[in-house]
Image: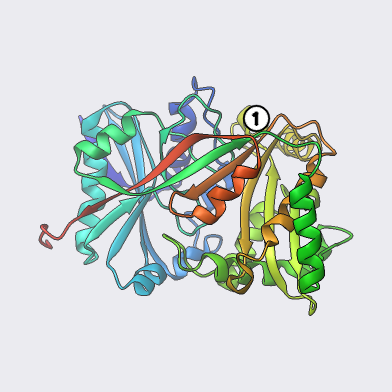
Amino acid sequence: MIEVKEVKTKREKKQFVDFPVKLYKNCPHYVPNLRGDELALFDPKKNVSYSDCDIVFYLALKDGKVAGRICGIVQKIYNKKQNEKRVRFTRFDVIEDFEVAKMLLDKIEEWAKQKGMEIVHGPLGFNDIDREGLLVEGFDELSTFEADYSYPYYAQFLEKLGYTKEVDWLEFQIKPQKKVNDRIARLADTVKKRYHLTVAKAKNKKEYINKYMEGIFECIDDAYGDLYGVIPYTKPLQEQIVKQFKLMISLDCMVTVLDENQKVIGFGFGLPSLAKAVQKSKGRLTPLGIMRILYATKHIKIFDFGLIAVRKEYQGKGLTGIIFQEMINQMSKYDIDYCETNHSLETNQKIILSWKNFEHKQHKRRRCYWKHLTNLKKD
C-alpha cells in the first residue's frame, strides 16, 4: 500500500530530511546536505523564502515505511518576472518504484492546479544558490557538496510521466595549474592597468563580509539576473546565504575585483571541497563534523568553483582573466588533485569557453524537466 501525505509534524519533518541519507547509504558518490540547513527549510523564521513563496512538503510511505519525498514551490518573484504560472519541485528522492514516484508527482501537480499554475518544472530550488537540476550524466562521479546526486532511474521515471528537458547544466573537471598561464597573466595585468582595477583584500572573514557582501550580491544580480531560474537576492536572502556559508568559506577562495571607486564589478567564489567531510558526518554538524569541515578548508585536495560573475558593462573585457589569475595563485599553495566547476547552463558559452584555457573534461550533466498542465482542470 502506498500513501502520500503532507509533512506536518516534527517527526515527519525529520523523516523528510533523513530519507535520502538512508536511500543512498551504500552509494559512495552521494554527498548529503547539511541536516540543520534542511530542517530550517520548514521554519519561516529561518527560511526567508516563505515571504515570497508558497511551499509544500510531501512524504510517500509504502507499507508504512518512508519510500519517497518531494517539495513544491510557487516562487512568486520568478513567476512575476517571467509572467508565467509555474510550480517548482525540489528535494525529489524516491526508491526504485515507479508507482511511488508517480504518486509524488501527481500530488505536486494537484497542488499546482489548486494554486492556479500551468507548468511544473524542476528539480529547482528556492533560489539560484539552492540545488538545481537532476543528474543525467556522471553517476560514477563523486558529487559536490553544492549539488544533489540522484540514481539513473529518477530521469526514467520523470520521462515516463511526461516530463521533458527544458534546460541542461554542464559540469567540468579541471586539472590544476601550478602557475598562471602566461597569456592569462599578461591579460590580467593589462586589464588591471587599463581600467584602474584592484583585487579586494581583507584581514579576516568578518571584515570581508562587512565591506563587500552587498556589492557582491549586486554584481551577481547584474550578471545573472536574466538567466534561467534566477531571482534577485533580497537583503534577508543575502543574510541567510552568508549565514549558511560563513563557516565554510575561505578568503583564499574568494576573488573580488573593484573599480577605481571601490565598487564590486567582478567576483569569483570557490570552496574547498567539503564532500568527503560531509559524507563522514552524514550531514550533521556535530563538534566532530565541524572539525572535519574546518580541516577540509585548510587541507584542500579538491577545489569547487562556485560562481564567477562580472557586471554586464565589464563583460568581454578580460576580467575573468584577473579572477582566474588570483584563484590559480591561491590554489598553488595546496596540493590539489583537481577542480570541480559545478554547473553552468549549456547555453552560457561565455563561461563554458573560459575552460578552454585549462586541461578539462565535461563529466556531469544536470537537467531541469518541465511539464505543461494546461490540460488539467482545477478541482
Nearest to the observer: residue 258 or residue 358:
358
Nearest to the observer: residue 206 or residue 221:
221
| Residue occupying the far right of the picture | 203
| Residue 125 sits above or below residue 294 on the image | below
* Quarter of the view holding residue 192: bottom right
Q: Quadrant of the N terminus?
A: top left
Residue that badge 1 annotates: 276
| Residue 156 sits above or below residue 9 on the image | above
Q: What residue is at 48 percent from the left and 55 percent from the top?
A: 348
Horizontal side of 135 relative to 321 (left or right) equals left
Across and down, in percent, residue 108 comes to 26, 51
Circle 1 SS class:
helix
**Residue type beneath disc 1:** Lys
Across and down, in percent, residue 283 comes to 60, 36
Horizontal side of 51 relative to 116 (left or right) equals right
Across and down, in percent, residue 244 comes to 64, 54
Across and down, in percent, residue 367 comes to 38, 44
Q: Answer whether residue 82 is visible to the viewer in this image.
A: yes
Q: What residue is at 43 percent from the left and 27 percent from the top?
A: 23
Horizontal side of 275 relative to 321 (left or right) equals left
Horizontal side of 243 relative to 46 (left or right) equals right
